[in-house]
Amino acid sequence: MNGSRIYSIAGGQCGRETLLAILREHPEIRFVSLVGIDLAGNDTDERIPIQAFTADIDAFLAGKAVQTDGSSVVLGTLTSLADAQVDLVPDLAATWFVDYNEEHRDTETGLPVGTLRIPSFLVHRGVRVDSRSLLESTVSYARRTLLDLLHAHALSPHVAHLEPGRLADIEVTVGTELEFWVKTPTDTANIDELSAAQVLQENYWQRTRGSARTALEQAVMALEAYGLHPEMGHKEVGGVKASIGPGGELAHVMEQMEIDWRYATAVQAADNELLARILVKEIFRANGLTVNFKAKPIPGVAGSGEHTHLGIAGVLPSGRRINLFAPADMRADFLSVIGYGALMGLLRNYEVVNPFISSSNDAFNRLKPGYEAPVCIVTALGADPAAPSRNRTVLAGLVRDVDNPRATRFELRSPNPYTNTYVAVAACIMAMLDGIRWTLESGSSPADLLAEISKKAGAPGRYLEQDRAYRSEENVFDHYSKEERDRLFGVPPATVWENMHMLENLPERVRVLGAGETFTPGVIQAFRAAALARWKHELLVRIVPDDLDVVRSCTRRNLDSAQAQAVWTAIDALCHELADDTPERPSVCGQLVAALEGGQLERASQLQLVLNATMERLRLLQDKYQKLVF
């Protein structure tokens, strides 16, 4: 509790009588919302009057009171129009949050009207089909499997410091970092100004001011009130300085920010992130600012990531936790054998993990060389175990503190704010578990595993692929050419279709995901189908029409210079290439639409890359032409 409000109800305290007592003590809670998470990461939100909830509370808690249409949530092929009933079943073990509407005051209490948001499962024909269920089931499988593996290898000297024979439980921990762009609603981006400010590092960690500062402080305080234990809020690399309005207020706000809070167990961490996004968006809106969580809201300027920190702890009967990734001697080794196995499993199987992390066009707009966005399947450990370092150009970085073994973890840098954290973390767990299993069963020492993960491309690997390299302490964007990166670390997918195709093209890796019987063939197919349907629809109704609008906006000016005429000739040629369909030469947009409508998805993927590259050339030429005009 905080003052007269209650912000959360701890997991396991949601029994019938306790819940009714809490609701009587807090009459400002006027509604209940059962929150299910579909395969796209969307959360259901409804307003059930508290009177209806309490009158039929037994049915609600048993999951027999609320249903939804399976076609109204993204479940892919798991439901159909002919069989669409989905029940919402409350998770009685989760933390429940109260969402307060600061713009709507309860007339009896004078407090904002509250909605009790109850994390729930989506159940179709008796089977859970939602993202929370997928993560919860995966964590349960990983806990059982890791305990069995560690108990079976308890006598191995390589894990003795982890006290494997005494472990009573396993805990998967996750922490996410939320980056986002904030702006005054009517402002538009000045790309040149934003790019210059970014290169000159004029905003990173700078002092916040005005309404942006107020909103940031309020957001951090709100996270504290809800028990998320915020660690900091700060300005990120993107943005420009605001100007002073006529009343002395700051106007024309456009900047990038980040808020971090404490890690939690896997499912709770994903629930916390969902709450944090809601709080941030509402609080900044109340201060007259809009928030954008897109991975790449502004072309040519830093995108927003959501770096995800992954750790595994062993729990002793006393409750004491042991970081299973930490080595016996923090100054002699980078990782324990469990840590090496988890990292190698993540890297070896990342091609089938990536579809669950990057499943949108927006995600791929960010995943390009530069701006610290990872494109290569590679890790960095540091030059010396005694002197930790952070390489921000790799996919999965090792985070460690030689004086604090509990801090040892991996930072996965590919997720973005709209990544479905539930399914992404579940896929990461299964990949890591595969590497841990191999490590323990092979009896490898830390030195063996360091040599394995540090091997050169072409050198045989016992677990890792021979033709790949998996470790680099260099800046992978500056040190290697594109051709070298592709040869050493693999060719990264460039479109949603290419990424989803990995789930068909790599059946052995897919079996790694399915080992726990949570990523079933039906679930994987449903996720893939839903992602491809969104990809196709967005191209048809948003991306292609928006690009055609850009083409139509190209206007010739009366400029006499030869340079201006040459630039316009190039612009005109690109416009015809993009949009002018002729019997002899159909346009790029026309071919793309035809391929999508004809179900030729591989060809559509190839044409999307052509469209992207051509539009980029057109925008550069337009910018050059405009500068010649003015």
Image: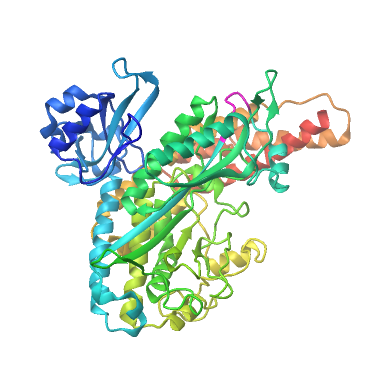
In the image, is 457 to the left or to the right of 319?
A: right
Residue 414 percent location from the top left of the image: 49, 54
Q: Residue at x 13, y 31 (%)?
A: 57
Q: Which residues are magenta?
A: 182-187
Q: Where, by quadrant of the figure, is residue 105 drawn?
A: top left
Q: Residue at x 20, y 43 (%)?
A: 13
Q: Quadrant for the N terminus, please.
A: top left
Residue 426 % position (x, y): 33, 55
> Which secondary structure class fits the magenta region best?
loop
Farthest residue, direction front: 3
Report if residue 127 is visible in the image: yes
In the image, is 627 to the left or to the right of 66?
Answer: right
**Residue 444 picture quarter:** bottom left
Q: Is residue 484 above or below residue 591?
A: below
| Front one among 439 and 245 | 245
- Side (left or right) of 53 relative to 282: left
In the picture, the quarter occupied by the C terminus is: top right
Above or below, 552 relative to 336: above
Image coordinates for residue 10, horizontal then vertical, percent: 26, 44
Report if residue 580 lies within the magenta region. Answer: no
The residue drawn where x is 34% and y is 53% is 266
- For residue 319, what is the image quadrant? bottom left
User: Is 186 colored magenta in this rendering?
Assistant: yes
Image coordinates for residue 562, horizontal then vertical, percent: 88, 35
Q: Nearer the viewer, residue 299 or 221?
A: 221
Above or below residue 479? Residue 119 is above
Direction from residue 261 to residue 195 in the image, left or right: right
